[in-house]
Image (tube, rainbow, N blue to C red):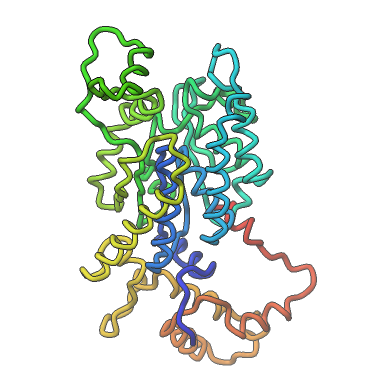
Amino acid sequence: MSEASVHSDFSRLARWLTGTSVGLVLGGGGARGAAHIGMIRAIQEAGIPIDMVGGVSIGAFMGALWCMERNITTVTQKAREWSNKMTQWGKQLLDLTYPATSMFSGRQFNTTIRSTFGEVHIEDLWLPYFTVTTDISASCMRIHRHGSLWRYIRASMSLSGYMPPLCDPVDGHLLLDGGYVNNLPADVMRSFGAKHILAIDVGSQDDVDLTNYGDDLSGWWLLWKRWNPFTTPVKVPNLPDIQSRLAYVSCNRQLEEVKKSDYCEYIRPPIDAYKTLQFGSFDEIREVGYRHGAAYFEGQRRGGGGGVSGAAAEGRRPDAQPQLTDYTFTDLAQMVCSVRTGRDVDNDSSSSSDYEEDQRHFEGYASEPSAGILEMSSSVEEGAAWISDTELVGTY
């Protein structure tokens, strides 16, 4: 029997049923989110399966792309196209409005996201997916696992002051960036059943080396300092940086718990040199994420394969006595493939032979249906109901 593929649907189902699913959590951070694409590529090359994805803000966008396409080349292309649209300041300026609620109406931003995802719903994605938003109507965190994909991604990316809150089409509640309540929802991923979690953090880091400008601040003075080469430079956070820091102030305690947790592998690529709105550096930031991820997982492999990467590649030891909990990842796929029709069961005269035959199936791995199950599918009576991939994902 051929080597099992940990990325196959059967293997994913086996991990889900045995409680060993691998979850990927992508945090918010604006343009720094391009590093998520590089990290996903490194994860795939390391042979680590991704069974479910959760994201916030730009992480919601990149994570949804992966769940929809599951092809790193296509995901990279679409993410690059969207990032290029975010650098077209002429169209952005046309979206300016009277700042009663926000600086921009959100119409142009909606168009860029909708053109990327179309009218796909969350429950129609290939992988289980969730995103987090901040409900300012009910003052709580909202978790979205079904409904309009582009709308909830847009809501999770809505920085206060820049974009108006999105009105939830279900209950009319006002939704803003999920980073204000949970910028790296590894705890949410754990509550959904993931045993091994990779949490990628691309949020801004606190910089305490700032200029003391006194009791008030003039933007014109900052502009003069920035453009005059003969003056002493000042270090003052701009509006996007302040908004990004606010997200961390409200969920800093949760982030520290994620860093210290034993159920989660916290990874932060070296992307501190890039600004929140630096979308023009997409390929550069993506490459930083990829190189960091490749080096990280290679180091784990050489060090004995600990953490999520070790769990993803582990197999049963030849000298180990098989236990029920040992049948993880792909073993259950073999068991599923060995299910026989009622007609075959009726023809068997000995129950002991059934047991011996089933036990032989446990000795190998499987990632795709065997010839037996293909023959079984062709002999199913008319009118039999099958569960589609979409329906199966929707039940998670």
Q: Is residue 392 above or below residue 171?
A: below
Tell me if I can see residue 147 in this picture. Answer: no
- Considering only vertical position in the picture, is 379 above or below 44? below
Tell me where residue 323 appears, x and y as whole percent. 33, 74
Image label count:
0
Position of 27 compared to 89: left or right?
A: left
Can you name the residue that lies furthest to the right here?
382
| Residue 344 placement (x, y as % from top left) | 64, 86
Which quadrant holds residue 39?
bottom left
Q: Nearer the viewer, residue 242 or 80?
A: 80
Locate residue 147, reporting x and y percent.
Answer: 62, 40
Above or below for 108 versus 295: above
Residue 188 sits in quarter: top left
Q: Residue at x 41, y 48 (%)?
A: 25
Name which quarter of the figure residue 348 lies in: bottom right
What residue is at 78 percent from the left and 68 percent from the top?
383
Seen from this angle, which residue lies furthest top? 215
